[in-house]
């Protein structure tokens, strides 16, 4: 069996790859592994369980809750809430673990399971491996230890989670948003009610789109992966800015008043300077991934801010931040972590803090984001290839070396197998967009021929 956990939990087509049986078994295994690690010693364990509004989340939630309760874990069901809300509540309620059912930005047929440890932190690779091993032992015949009678877990709804999370978001804002008009695109996802409530309580005049989830329309032509609707809405409503989330609202992208996209790199740049000004940018350092635009690195150098780069995935950004005590990190895709206020990427918090900077300075979002210039970057997703051979293909290595010679010091190449989807990402940066497109196209063709 291949590794179940990817860069962001376990994902697959719901009821095909990700079945009720798998969800139940992984939940029991997670309870056993975390218990063996000492998390549950001396008290009755508790778990927080939430989900995004996908239709499949209904039966998968039932399976997860059943698995946890059967292992002796009390369960607090918080319903449809963003991933960062589940992480926050796991820590705030002193729960032993949290479980979020979501496939983030993926299309509706997919779903996923993310586990959080005590404090609301994502699990290290070693713990995920242990969960897989225990699950696999059970799947092949080893029996579970099953409590009976009063030992089984109890299940109840925790409806206070919504207000508690919104209050947390408002409580950490440096200033209010009065006077700003903001369009919010909720991707018909987990933040459809939370985000508008938070922005309204913070004083903004809001317009919402993509805020009517029906279980089937999540990420469908809207949200952070489809910004055209938001761009039009911001211009049509004369808004100061727009904020877009993905299905589980752990990411945030933005749009300025003229309908131009503001990506995660630009958001990080704005927040880095704001936090430095407030004395909150510990180590005068921001953490980003190797996918960040070269323009971001150059902008931070110009501003005297140190940049640490990690492998792709917000978990690796977070690991670096925790290890060295840094306060801010994130990804170009819009996963932004403000470690003083969140244990994972939080799209609503990021959007609020970005808007707060606009309100505090009186500058437009375009002016603030102008601190960096994005170099032309082309990203091609090559599907239906063997992504496991990216690092071992001689043909591919030769093509990359040739591309790097062509680009010289004015650009770069990055090939990366997706951690959540069956594809290889080809990213090329160059001083000229046409050169970037040409090089990316040639590399994509080699990926298809070498790995197809």
Image (cartoon, rainbow, N blue to C red):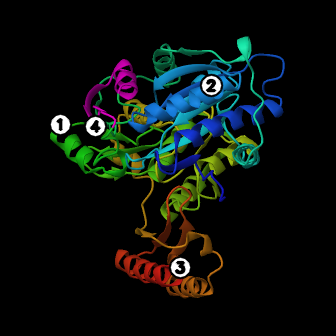
In which quadrant will I find the N terminus? bottom right
| Residue 200 quadrant | top left
Query: How far apart, in angstroms, are the residues tagged by discs 2 and 1?
Result: 38 Å
Earlier-in-chain disc, 2 versus 1: 2
Depth check, mark 2 against mark 3: the one in front is 3
Q: Can the viewer see residue 88 in this picture?
A: no
Q: Are marks 2 and 1 in contact (CB under 8 Å)?
A: no
Residue that numbered label 1 is attached to: 237
Q: Are marks 4 and 1 in contact (CB under 8 Å)?
A: no
Query: How far apart, in angstroms, are the residues tagged by discs 2 and 4?
Result: 27 Å
Question: Which residue occupies 49% across, 13% down?
Answer: 160
Q: Position of residue 246 (x, y in %)?
A: 40, 43
Q: Can the viewer see residue 298 in this picture?
A: yes
Query: How far apart, in angstroms, are the residues tagged by discs 3 and 1?
Result: 47 Å
Q: Is residue 3 left or right of residue 107?
A: right
Query: How far apart, in angstroms, are the residues tagged by discs 4 and 3?
Result: 38 Å
């Amino acid at each position: 069996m291949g590794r179940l956990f990817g860069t962001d939990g376990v994902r697959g087509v719901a009821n095909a790859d990700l079945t009720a049986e798998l969800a139940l078994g992984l939940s029991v295994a997670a309870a056993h592994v975390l218990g063996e690690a000492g998390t549950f010693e001396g008290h009755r364990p508790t778990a927080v369980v939430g989900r995004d509004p996908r239709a499949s989340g209904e039966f998968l939630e039932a399976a997860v809750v059943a698995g946890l309760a059967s292992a002796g874990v009390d369960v607090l069901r918080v319903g449809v809430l963003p991933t960062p809300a589940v992480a926050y509540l796991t820590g705030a309620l002193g729960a032993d673990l949290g479980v979020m059912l979501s496939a983030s930005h993926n299309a509706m047929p997919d779903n996923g399971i993310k586990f959080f440890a005590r404090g609301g932190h994502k699990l290290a690779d070693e713990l995920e491996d242990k969960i897989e091993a225990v699950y696999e032992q059970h799947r092949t015949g080893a029996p579970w230890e099953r409590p009976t009678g009063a030992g089984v877990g109890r299940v109840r709804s925790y409806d206070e989670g919504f207000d508690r999370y919104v209050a947390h978001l408002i409580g950490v804002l440096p200033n209010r948003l009065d006077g700003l008009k903001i369009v919010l695109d909720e991707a018909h996802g987990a933040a459809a009610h939370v985000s508008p409530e938070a922005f309204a309580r913070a004083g903004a005049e809001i317009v919402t789109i993509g805020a009517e989830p029906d279980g089937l329309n999540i990420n469908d032509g809207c949200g952070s992966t489809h910004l055209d609707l938001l761009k039009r809405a911001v211009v049509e409503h004369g808004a100061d800015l727009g904020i877009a989330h993905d299905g589980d609202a752990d990411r945030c992208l933005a749009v300025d008043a003229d309908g131009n996209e503001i990506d995660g790199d630009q958001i990080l740049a704005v927040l880095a300077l704001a936090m430095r000004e407030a004395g909150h940018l510990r180590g005068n350092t921001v953490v980003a991934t190797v996918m960040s635009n070269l323009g971001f690195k150059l902008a931070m150098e110009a501003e005297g801010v140190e940049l640490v780069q990690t492998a792709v995935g917000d978990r690796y950004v977070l690991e670096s931040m925790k290890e060295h005590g840094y306060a801010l990190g994130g990804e170009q895709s819009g996963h932004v972590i403000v470690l003083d206020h969140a244990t994972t990427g939080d799209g609503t918090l990021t959007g609020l803090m970005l808007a707060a900077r606009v309100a505090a300075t009186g500058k437009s979002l375009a002016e603030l984001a102008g601190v960096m210039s994005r170099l032309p970057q082309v990203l091609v997703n090559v599907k239906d290839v063997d992504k496991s051979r990216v690092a071992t293909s001689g043909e591919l290595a030769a093509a990359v070396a040739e591309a790097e010679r062509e680009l010289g010091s004015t650009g770069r190449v990055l090939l990366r197998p997706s951690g959540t989807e069956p594809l290889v990402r080809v990213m090329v940066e160059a001083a000229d967009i046409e050169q970037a497109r040409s090089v990316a196209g040639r590399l994509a063709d080699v990926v298809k021929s070498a790995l197809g």
